[in-house]
Amino acid sequence: MIFSENSDQAVVYLRKAVPKMMQHNIIPNPFNFTLWYAYYSKRFPNLNDELDSVIDDFGTCPANISEKLFLKYIIDSDAEIDSIKELFQQSVVNIVDNLAESIDQTSRQSQNFSAALNQSIVSLADSELGPEVSGLLNKISASASGLCDLNTAFQGEMSEAQQEIQSLKKQLVESQLQANTDSLTGLNNRRVFDALFRQLLEADNQSEISLIMMDIDKFKVFNDTHGHLMGDQVLKFVGKLLKAECPAPIVPVRFGGEEFALLCPGMDLDKTREVAEDLRTKLSRIGLSNKRTGEKLPPVTASFGISISRSNEMLHHLIERADQALYTAKENGRNRVHVAL
């Protein structure tokens, strides 16, 4: 991952990047946010030199140049784009949190100040004062009342602002969840699968990582016979089964279509095969029916392919070997588990 800063560091870079973009009328699009975030992280010294030169020449950073610099320095893979999105989104969440806390502190301090001022004026009014002092006190009291009225209005505005901030934070969290979740099954999606594999390798590239690829047998025939709505119900059911039967550290994901993947960190081959066999058996024994018509549906089965990571193996090689094992399982009659050699 090219950006490895924690969220606090990310907030610092983002706070520097945004004013810089505003100063030079730079369009606030994802290319430019990422470029100027990278600029302040000093991740790519040559990028900083080029950006400084562009600003000197144009007074801004034209869109076509931004895109070229983005492709030149930032893009290594789709996985890198995802890591940038996650970091940027988390930075925005942290900024929102800090802003809400700052507003809350300011509001409390303002209320305390107004209360103390009013109490002091009341105490002075109860004392025996000369005419001149009393007149001055009346003016101060009138000014203080106006200040308190302004503060009350300000408190209302701050309350509304906090509600909007919390709403924004909720939307950010929900969008992050949606970006990581398959909408039909509720499982994690391929994006999470790829990111988790990278994290596991970065944490300990010596630890074994097993992979189970699972594909529902004859799903196209099922869809053609019973309709896509029933097919979607089957996919939802499989998603629920995987959630219920796959405790941590197993991470089930919908890989695409009728194919699912289970990432099994720290699990040896025997344990992984046991997990796959258990899922295969439970799925094949469950009777499904069409709730609308009462029609009993044919048993739903799945085939499984297993691979286990080799030293410094790339993810696509691990997937490829598990897929080959999956195809072998289907060729040998389906509804079975096969392990890659």
Image (cartoon, rainbow, N blue to C red):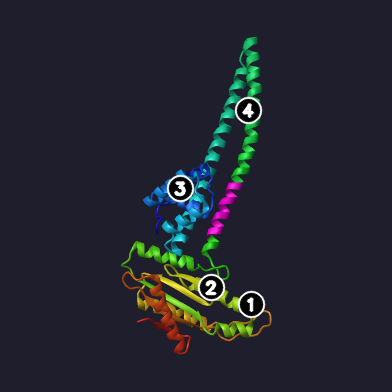
Q: Is residue 24 above or below residue 4?
A: above
Near-viewer residue (221 or 119)? 221
Neighbours of disc 2 within 10 Å: few (<14), some (14-19), many (20+): many
The residue range painted magenta reads 164-176
Residue, disc 1: 229
Neighbours of disc 4 within 10 Å: few (<14), some (14-19), many (20+): some
Tell me where residue 247 sits by quadrant: bottom left
Say whether residue 316 is left or right of residue 109.
Answer: left
Q: Which mark is residue 239?
A: 2
- Name which of mark 2 and mark 3 comes first in the sequence: 3
Amino acid type of the residue that numbered disc 1 sits on in the rendered structure: Leu
Q: CA distance from mark 1 to mark 4?
A: 64 Å
SS of the residue at dot 3? helix
Q: Which mark is residue 219?
A: none
Residue, disc 4: 147
Please say whether residue 71 is visible from this viewpoint. yes
Q: Nearer the viewer, mark 2 or mark 1?
A: 1
- Name which of mark 3 and mark 4 comes first in the sequence: 3
